[in-house]
Image: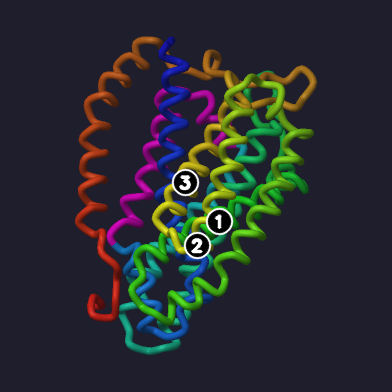
Amino acid sequence: MDLNTLWFILITVLFSGFFVLEGFDYGVGTLLPFVAKNDTERRVVLNTIGPHWDANEVWLLTAGGAIFAAFPNWYATLFSGFYLALFAILFALIIRGVAIDFRSKNDSSTWRQVWDILFCVGSLLPSVLFGVAVSNFMTGVPIDANMEYAGNFFTLLTPFTLLGGVTVLLVLTFHGMLFLKLKNGVQAIEDRIKAMGTKLGLVMLVVTVAWVVFAAFKTRLLTNGPVAIISVALAAVLLILSVLLQAKGSDGKAFICSSLAIVMVVVTVFFSMFPSVMISTLPGGLSLDIWNASSSPKTLKIMTIVALTAVPVVLAYLIWSYWVFRKRVTEKDLHY
């Protein structure tokens, strides 16, 4: 395996970690107004992700940094072409982080409700926009022969990409609901989650199937080798299992299935494009692949050594932090 392919796989792994871990953060944030009806309950919900949300965002920063270092032409085309969409995501993430901290600065119920709403919006908007971006990767975007994006923001908004946005929103919301079932210790919140669980799961499955069928006609999903086909099939099975298991009360197993399904979805997206990283839809345009978008072999070699040294340490810390904060959150755990 050459280093170009290795770094394509490593970036796939980084985005898988991001969508699994930060994904349940987004899901919890999206569900906040629906499962928590007073300030105490909202504080419990926020505290379930309190020790993890900022660390989980590091996966996105690391993935972006890896693209910048390993595939600079991909980074340049992506961040210039998707500038407005990425700025909207960044703005939402800033508001989201500020909302968690600022809601506790004033005891006013109105003050806290405003920041809770902003936290919900800051969780919902990135989920939708990431779904739109992912769908655009799969279908391709207008890139000219100079590797420059030739469209605008509205070029990225099509029925398929908008459906992708809704699909990712529903998948991450369901994923967050499963995490909340594992971490919440308040009965009233648990009752509301149970009431919506199966309904949300069924809606998610229907929309996801629609998106996959759409993708089969609009993308290389079924024509770009066996990896994408196998991974999308596994994702479908795992999502169905997660819905069935949560309905039976096997929340831990359901969460594992949901996590693995998200990993399979990310694998599907990346390997439906491989070896391309950004597909051009223009006649005479230039698609970016793991060779024409990459850094020099020496750079990739140095990065590989650094990654093999640092990643095990980061993973060990991540596992330790989740172990330390493994217990359910109740009203007794609330403090500012």
Residue 91, given in percent of the width and then of the height, sits at: 49, 57
> Where does label 3 land, which residue?
19
Q: CA distance from mark 2 to mark 1?
A: 6 Å
Residue neighbourhood size for the residue with mark 2, other residues' Cα within 10 Å, grouped as few (<14), some (14–19), many (≥20): few
Span highlighted in magenta in the image: 51-80
Q: Can residue 126 be seen from the camera position used here?
A: no
Residue 258 drawn above or below residue 49: above
Q: Can residue 120 be seen from the camera position used here?
A: yes
Residue type for callout 2: Lys
User: Along the horizontal axis of the image, is 67 left or right of 314?
Assistant: right
User: Along the horizontal axis of the image, is 146 left or right of 97?
Assistant: right
- For image coordinates 57% across by 36% down, the residue present is 234
Viewer-side residue, 72 vs 164: 164
Viewer-side residue, 63 vs 273: 273
The answer to whether residue 139 is magenta is: no
> Where does label 2 land, which residue?
248
Residue 148, given in percent of the width and then of the height, sits at: 64, 27
Please identify, in this view, whether the residue under mark 3 or under mark 2 is nearer the observer: 2
- For image coordinates 47% across by 31% down, the residue present is 12
Residue type for callout 3: Phe
Residue 205 drawn above or below residue 187: above
Residue neighbourhood size for the residue with mark 3, other residues' Cα within 10 Å, grouped as few (<14), some (14–19), many (≥20): many
Image quadrant in which you'd find residue 307 = top left
Residue neighbourhood size for the residue with mark 1, other residues' Cα within 10 Å, grouped as few (<14), some (14–19), many (≥20): some
Image quadrant in which you'd find residue 278 = top right
Q: CA distance from mark 3 to mark 1?
A: 22 Å
> Would you say the residues marked 2 and 1 are in contact, meaning their CB atoms lie under 8 Å apart?
yes
Q: CA distance from mark 3 to mark 2?
A: 25 Å
Residue 156 drawn above or below residue 26: above
Viewer-side residue, 248 vs 224: 248
Residue type for callout 1: Leu
